[in-house]
Image (cartoon, grey):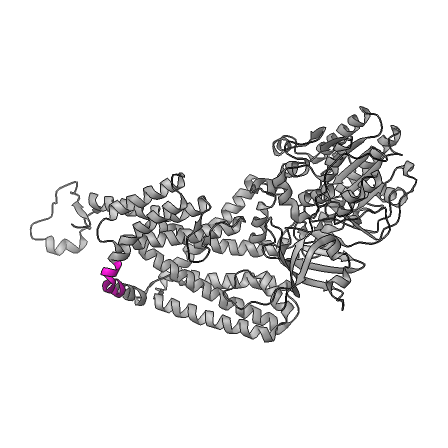
Amino acid sequence: MQDTINITLPKKRPSSRPAGTEGRLALATPAKKVLAVPPPEMVTRRCFRFLCWLGSVAAFGVNFYQNWTIPWPGQGIVVRSGPIVLEALALTVLFFIGSLIGGGWWRAMQRGRRIGGTAIFLWSGAAFAGFLSREIFWLGWWLWLLPAAVSWLKNARSHLSATRAFFLEKTSWNGAFFLLWIVVCTGCDAALLRDAPPGVWATLDCLAGRFLNHVFIAATLWLVLQWHDRWASRLGRIVAWSALVLLLYIVVTNALLHVWWAKGWIELLGELEVGGTSSISSSASASGLSFQPVNVLLIVASLLVAAASHAGCRWISRSKKWRISLAQLALIAGVAWTGYQIDQFGGIHLKSRAWRWWEMKSFHLRMTSIKPEQGIANYQVRIANPLPEIRPQQLARKPDIFLIMVETLRADALRPEVAPFLTQWRDTECQPLGESWAASNATHLSWFSILSGRLPVFYEEARQAAAPALLPALLSASGYHVEARLAGDIDYMEMRRTLFGEPPQLAALDYNNAAEIRKKPATPERDLAALEKIRRSVLAREAGGAFFLTSLDSTHFPYEWAADFNPPFDDYAENAIPPLHADAKKVRRILHRYWNAVSWVDRQLAGFIGFLKAQNRYDNAIIVIIGDHGEEFREYGSWFHCSSLNAAQTRVPILIKWPQAMGIGRGPGVRQSSHLDLVPTLLDALGVEKNLWQSLPGRSLLRPGEGTTVLATNYAGKNGEAMVLRRAGREAAFGWQNYWESTVPQQIWLERLEPLDEGGLVSAFPDLQEKIFQTIREESP
């Protein structure tokens, strides 16, 4: 049957040309209009082919949807590992596999295509609906594939001949976009070299290696896509090339994120899974970002630019009549891959271990099996996880306890020109604590350590348990009235169930969820409301036996204060969103905005402390004002928090005022303290049994001695330092595989030890095995 039916459209008027002039006028006669209408048989065949392709793609997609492991020799292929970015990569790979197999099946079959194509579509649909088990589904898939394999073997000679011709035939290709891909990807990697260790030759070698790496990746992608175009349906081809354009867009934005925030898409999107949430909107809101129309338009515009660049390159390539064969692409890929392996092997001798390890961490996509040793040393560990029993206590004293969390409060904010009240209060009435550190660089992780005394790496375990944290639970069991009046949203990262249980086990809980924040977006108003609710609770109760928890959010991005407040710094940024390239003046203006927000919160805290004094509730109360994490303003090359455990993001004030009745004055001086010390210290002050808090990683600040301060995070950014130990001027930083996932590592490596200690890690941190690691064993190099 012919592929088309030619329909000649009649002219509107009969021809009036004289007889015998047809030949002379033929060149001037307009061509007849011809419509190419596919015959019904061809339309039907295309529909069944598309159905077969879609069913094959769905056959692999169902493994992702149902979280199945694909059968494979050994332990199988796990297609869904958790972090969003890895799941997206797995889904993309599954799409290509299903698309290729579906197209190949249709080409190999000589008969039974329509029945087979319909069958795989219905079979995959049944699996998506949950009607088939993994074993039954894969058995049916192999039975569907079997006749195509037999048919291919019967006609192997003709198939191989056609494949050889296809492999050697030169076809038009978008060579301009191929070159653009290599230049852009190499340029993005070059932008990250600004943070590389010193060494000119090592830097040049790294850049050469990245170029070869991207040439190999580009040639391989084009090779696969050319083959995919041969077999896939039209929709499959559109999806595949659109994914390629989007991938280049992701590469560019990944580099921009690294420059701007010291972490890329893998870390950023992987973090959405931390704490059991995949809410992009809530995470963006917590980061100070919003999906306003202007932001959405910018994203759409940038995507259109990416698509236009592909179209422009395609036009250039066609005008230049660029052609290439699959054999030539394979040769390019082979040469680039070989050169990259030689470069990596030579780098062992050219670059130091530290340089090669930095390169490994900075560039995730490396087409080589030649890898440097991880860090300085490797350890098998079991992190200590004490879980004290919560049982009622006969407390020696039951003073009121006020715990005030101030969002994003840096330690150096406490100086007279910024926070005059807190500065004076710290220096005259609070325990002298020296350096004070957060347990982490993220709100939910720090709150978890503050209220439970546990290391942040156990956040996911606590979220799953949905039991109240140690401090509020033990106080409540011992007769305390426990309530929380919070300005922020503790549905974020499921903090509510992780800290207070499900349902919340508090006498009173009040906070602003995301819907309420949208209704009343002004953060200062929410802060004032939270403090007012605490005031009312204080007035409604007799002194003693109450634990009041509150939080203030104005110091969090975008750093706000009430309209009637006169900020101390006039030269501040009207918008806290920093530009991509911020000079010293722009950074200073944003920092001044932050100082102004701190100053406003300082005034509110002064008023609240004044209220307690006026109500005679101050002298015999325990009052703790604490920052949950710090904030970076390009001191280490990044912005805000959640990208590093450096001092800017983790040095916070910890202010503790003890009751006069305890008779200890301001309390003993301490050289170093952290969030993890708060639970042991408060329980010790109340007279709780020692065995309920001595095993925790923190220590009581009321007792002499010095301990190791531990910081940990899922938000380690580009440097990969997910745990930092500090003691007596020494620092040790550790990393582990996929630190952004909500897992407790069993294998870690030492990133750095400063200063180096001849006695090693245990000598530098003598309480390492007592408080932090239940077991730690160094692996042989």
- Does 160 appear in magenta? yes
- Would you identify the image quadrant in which residue 378 lies? bottom right
**Of 352 and 80, the residue lying toward us:** 80
Q: Position of residue 629 (x, y in %)?
A: 72, 47
Question: What span is in magenta?
Answer: 152-161
- Res 490 seen here: no
Q: Residue furthest left?
A: 19
The picture places residue 505, in percent across and down from the top left corner, at: 69, 31
Position of residue 607 in the picture relative to residue 55 (left or right): right
Quadrant location of residue 752?
A: bottom right
Image quadrant where residue 241 sits: bottom left
Q: Nearer the viewer, residue 736 or 88?
A: 736
Say whether residue 163 is visible: yes
From the viewer's perspective, tell me whether residue 272 is left or right of residue 668: left
Horizontal side of 705 relative to 172 (left or right) equals: right
Q: Main secondary structure of the magenta part?
A: helix
Percent across and percent down for residue 767 are: 77, 56
The residue that appears at 39% across and 47% down in the rendered structure is 135
190 drawn magenta: no
Question: 738 or 45: which is nearer to us?
Answer: 738
User: Closest to the observer: 746 or 375?
Assistant: 746
- Left/right placement of residue 726 relative to residue 360 reads right
Decide: is 749 above or below 303: below
